[in-house]
Structure formats: structure tokens, C-alpha cells
Image (tube, rainbow, N blue to C red):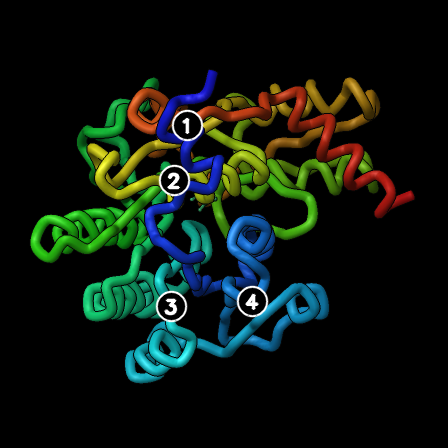
Amino acid sequence: SPHPYTQSARDGNVQLGTKPRILITGSHGQLGYGVAQALRKSYGRENVIMSDIIKPSKRILESGPYIHADILDFKNLQQVVVTHRLDWLIHFSALLSAVGEKNLSLAMKVNVEGVHNILELSRQFGLRLFVPSTIGAFGPESPRNPTPNLTVQRPKTIYGVSKVHAELLGEYFHHRYGLDFRCLRFPGVISYDTNPGGGTTDYAVQIFHDALTTRHHVCYLRKDTRLPMMYITDTIKSICEFMALDSSVLPQRTYNVTAMSFTPEEIADSIRRHIPSLEVTYKPDDRQKIADSWPQVFDDSEARTEWGWEHEYDLDKLVDIMITSLRPKYA
Ligand code: AKB
């Protein structure tokens, strides 16, 4: 049976008397649309505002409120909070691991300066703040199998360094000012209707598209590179449940969450249950080095025992839903 805290959150017992008004930054990324739709189900369409600095896609525009909000423009962010009477902030804007290494100065701006703005804004206005972190916040000196919640963190990418920075500053703001900062460290997220934007785990999405089209995937990782992963429905569920928890029941502010771990060879074998002719060629590039410094198996037992995190999708279930959902697109 579900953990009592999570059950209470699932039943909609959020701490606020009224439904929270929520802003999502970086809404055009892999997680924005799904998280917005899930939160809108709980708190109402008009109470969840998506934002980004680019023109919204038709799907996003038609789904509910969308505004322009630049996380590097602090004054504008203050106006947005006041105008839209915000209670919660879900901060998705970030450059991912592979793309961050290719554009260090932009990564410093978005991932470091952006987080400074978001933390200060949340402190000033008493917002409940969610910032995702990642398996990338660990490095070669961390235990890799399994990687516990609390351990050495010496990442070797700007993405990882900026995420450790966000974790530590968020926890400091919580300790010093009582900021309701919440952070989940995610593994690679796999989804069919949005794409990841330049990470090291992206192959695990691309392989499905290739399997259904050319039947040939060129993998930039070695076939035995084991990484933690999860299906997007589980990611969305973890964010919604974690955000709904009463602040007083949370013993910690930053938690590992995951669902499974696999290698390129293992996911290819699972896909071959549907598409036996799938071929994979291995051509490791710069991303191999990043993957070699990351956790292989993520220990999320503290999220499971302390607030009831549980995943639904394992490898075969993930592969089944990805193939079933993508097949019509290529039929
Ligand atoms: C990446 O590969 O950079 C991301 C992540 C694991 O944080 N998907």
C-alpha cells in the first residue's frame, strides 16, 4: 500500500488552503508539457502557467496559459510573480550535459546565473520551489553501483557542477531563510512525444525512432554502458507527488529517484521483442567519458522510505509503451 504521505498528497491534501498558482520555466523542454498537464489536472488549467523565451508550439499554446519569461531578467520575473499571484515555481530551464560542454558560457548563464535569480525570487516571494537535479551531479569519485543519496559529488561537466551548486544553494536557502526548496535527482528520462535536448542519455530515446524507421541505430556509447533511466510518466508522477507533500513531513530537500538501469545492449534486446531486425552499431564519442563518470545504479531508497516514491515502469514495460506510442507516427 502507498506510503501515508504520498497517499495524502495523491488525495490532493496540499498544504495551501487554495489551489496553488504555478509557473513552469523552460516549458519547451522534455518535461514541461507533461508536468503542466498533470498539475493542471490537480489544480486547474488556469493555475498552471507555462513559460519560456521562445514562441510556443501549437500544442502548448492550446493547452493553457503560456507567457514569455526570461530567467535571466530578474525584474521581469518579479513582475510575473506579482501579476500572476504565483505560489510555486518549477524551474526546468537548463542546458543538459552534452550541450553544456559545447557552450560553456551559455551554460554558466542559464544554469548558474538563472538559478541565482530563481532562488532569490523564491525567497523574496515565499514560493515553493522545485529544481530538478540529475545523476550528472555525481562524478568518477562517487560510488557508482549503487550511488546513495548522500555521498561524494565531484562532477566533471558544467551541467553537473551547476546542479550541485543548485542543490547546495537551495538547501542553504532552506536552512537560512526557510525557503521551501525541493529537488529530485533524475536519471535519463525517456519519452515519445517530447525530445530530450542534448544530454548523454538521449540515445535511449533515439534508438526507438531508429528501430521504427531505418532499423539501424548508431549508438554513441559502448554497448555495456549501464545508466539509470526512467519513463516520463514516472518522472511526472514523482514531481507532482513530491510537490504536493506538506513541507513539514520532508526530512530532506534533495532525493535520488529512479526506476531502472540498463545498457544499450539490454535496451536493444528488449526492443527486438517487437522489432527483431534492429541492428545497433557502436561508435563511442565524447559522451562516453561523461557516461563513464556517472552512476550505473542509483539508490533511491530514501525517497521510497521517507515519502513513498515508487515507480511503475520497468525496462520491458517502458519499451512496450514507447513502441506502441511511436508506431503510428511511422506507419
Ligand atoms: C543528460 O543526459 O544530460 C540528462 C540527465 C541524465 O540529466 N538526461
Residue tagged 3: 86
Image region (quadrant) for ligand 1: top left
Identify the mark at residue 218; answer none if there is no mark: none
Gap in Å between the C-alphas at discs 3 and 2? 18 Å
Q: CA distance from mark 3 to mark 1?
A: 27 Å
Which residue is the site of mark 1?
Answer: 309
Residue 115 shown left or right of residue 238 in the figure: left
- Residue 319, image x and y in percent? 69, 27
Q: Within 8 Å of ligand 1, the CB of disc 1?
A: no
Q: Position of residue 142 (x, y in %)?
A: 24, 28
- How far apart, in angstroms, are the residues tagged by discs 4 and 1? 28 Å
| Rendered residue at 39%/45% (across/down) | 14
| Label 1 with label 2: CB-CB less than 8 Å | yes
| Amino acid type, mark 4 | Glu
Question: On the rendered image, what quadrant is the C terminus found in?
Answer: top right
Residue 12 rendering spot, x and y as whole percentages: 46, 42
Local crowd at mark 2 within 10 Å, few (<14), some, or many (≥20)?
A: many
The residue under label 2 is 242
Query: Amino acid type of disc 2?
Result: Phe
